[in-house]
Amino acid sequence: MELKRRQPIGVELVKRGIVDEEDIERALDYQRQHPNVKIGDCLYELDVCDPYVLITTIGEILGEKGILLSKNPIKVNVEEYISLDIAKKNKAIPFEVENGKIKVCFANTVNRRSIETIRLLFLNKGLIMEPYITFEKDITQILKSLEGKANADIHESGVTIINLVDSIIKTGIEKRASDIHIEPMATSVRVRYRIDGELFTAANLDKEKQQQIIGRLKAISNMHQEKQESQDGRILLYEDYNIRVSSQPNVYGEKFVLRLLKKNANIKNIFDLGYYGEEEEFKKSVNKKNSITIMAAPTGEGKTTSLYSIIDYLNKPEINITTIEDPVEIRIPGLNQIEIDNRTTFAGALRTVLRQDPDIILVGEIRDRETAEIAIQAGQTGHYVLSTIHTIDSIEVINRLRKIGVSDYDIASTLATSISQRLVRRICPKCKREREFTKEEKDIITNILEKYGEKIDLKDIKTYDSLGCDYCNGTGFYDRIGIFEILNITDELKELIVSGASSMELRKKSLEEGYRPLIVDGIRKVLKGETTLDELNKKLLFF
């Protein structure tokens, strides 16, 4: 549907006699104080004319049907058709379904991308969408009234605080949440779930229940009830889960974050995680004696999961593998797993482990010079060491080790491979819909690949829209996949490291030898239909 207006909305409304110039001046003053509010919504807020006449006229100007949603009953259960998160993101509310058509109100029908997203979502459900336009204020109020009801189980079972807390946790488990956030706010207690890396609001509970919820959480996680300070605890009431609990006071009370760790979880094959290349190449990158492999990524990007997969791949009865972790997240049969506590450090545990005749050692994280030097020594004396470090990519691992205090000689002689990764959401296999790449998308992909010496013909390659269905809780995504970059330290790179070469020099030589940054593997996974350009851009910010 094409945009019909030739002049600003305000000018059109004056021309049609709906408002006068004085009303527009008042609306513009209001808009200067509220810069994100559209002029039509400003006029609605100021109540300068009949709201129904105003919205229907705005609809005519835009070539859409205008409707006053506050005066028209919503005849559907909104959450049966669209998740609240998608509704909020696109400022859209379905309000009536009849004869295979679904009527949907938008706050902004000029945003064609949102319109198309919602149209495809309902088309996937077998419904033809009929768009309407209404005031954003009304959509916001309706969504606010629905927010917190997204998880009916939480409210229905909240007869007692014991049941309420139990329901919050069980619902998080059912929805595949990795974390549950229970957050005191000014007038409520907000419950959010992190699912596939994204936070979703599940409920806003009554403020008067706050202290009882906090008391119950402290009781089951073995925390001090009287302490109003940061604490750590564990919940062991759920058969298949070891739940780590962290509390942190904020201005409205104590916030709790529950990390849901599944006991004896199946370790994914490294290639199922998204690791690219052939198995022979992978073997060359790992399990080199007298060396270290380091996994680099920010917090929450799957470093530990990837290391577990590598360890599981290398695990054999004739090999002695010991891990030093903080904490042990997954217990793997056949491994000697050591958990760091208040009395132990990575460096101290590593010294002891070296006397235990290990072949392979996993050190959860290299945090300081002492740990790094002992790990280097272990790698130089016949062991294979795997660890993680916090830095942005695989080449910056070298600089990070330098900053910690490891010498260029020790880095060059011991570091065999550095791997960097990010996690992006996978498109839901149940509701994805194929489409052509847009010209803009093709240009982005072509420019990135050509920059790194790779060419591709996009003529016959399709992409997918993530629509949303019951399987993926209406998000359009299910699970996550890793995007990787792998830097194998060749003899030429070793010489550059020893000579003190900068990151720029190391990157240039690495690219000549076949190294490709994260963005290239990300684009490959977009082209395979595993994720979207938007998801990739959230992590790498390339457009």
Image: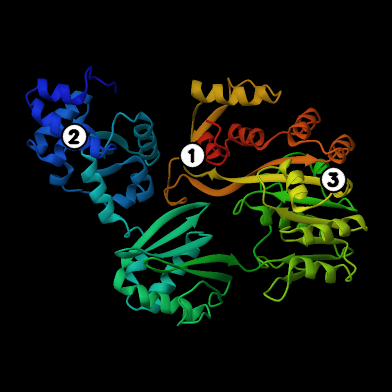
**Real-space Cα distance between discs 2 and 1?**
45 Å
> Position of 505 compared to 136: left or right?
right
> Position of 313 compared to 476: left or right?
right
Residue at the top extreme, as displayed? 6
Crowd band around label 2 with a 10 angstrom C-alpha radius: few (<14), some (14–19), many (20+): few
- Mark 2 highlights which residue? 29
Q: Amino acid at mark 3?
A: Asp
Residue at the right extreme, as displayed? 381
Q: Which of pointers 2 and 1 lies earlier in the amino acid sequence?
A: 2
State the SS at label 2: helix
192 vs 266, nearest the viewer: 192
Q: Amino acid at mark 2?
A: Asp
> Which residue is found at the position 88% from the left and 46% from the top?
409
- Mark 3 highlights which residue? 408
The mark found on residue 191 in the picture is none
Q: Classify 518 as above or below 477.
A: above
**Real-space Cα distance between discs 1 and 3?**
49 Å
289 vs 395, nearest the viewer: 395
* Residue 479: percent from left, percent from top: 55, 50
Rendered-image quadrant of the N terminus: top left
* Residue 511: percent from left, percent from top: 76, 30
Picture quarter containing residue 132?
top left
* Residue 301: percent from left, percent from top: 61, 51
> Which residue is found at the position 22% from the left and 22% from the top?
8
Q: Can residue 489 be seen by looking at this rendering?
A: yes
251 vs 321, nearest the viewer: 251
- Mark 1 highlights which residue? 432
Q: How many badges with numbers are in the image?
A: 3
State the SS at label 1: loop
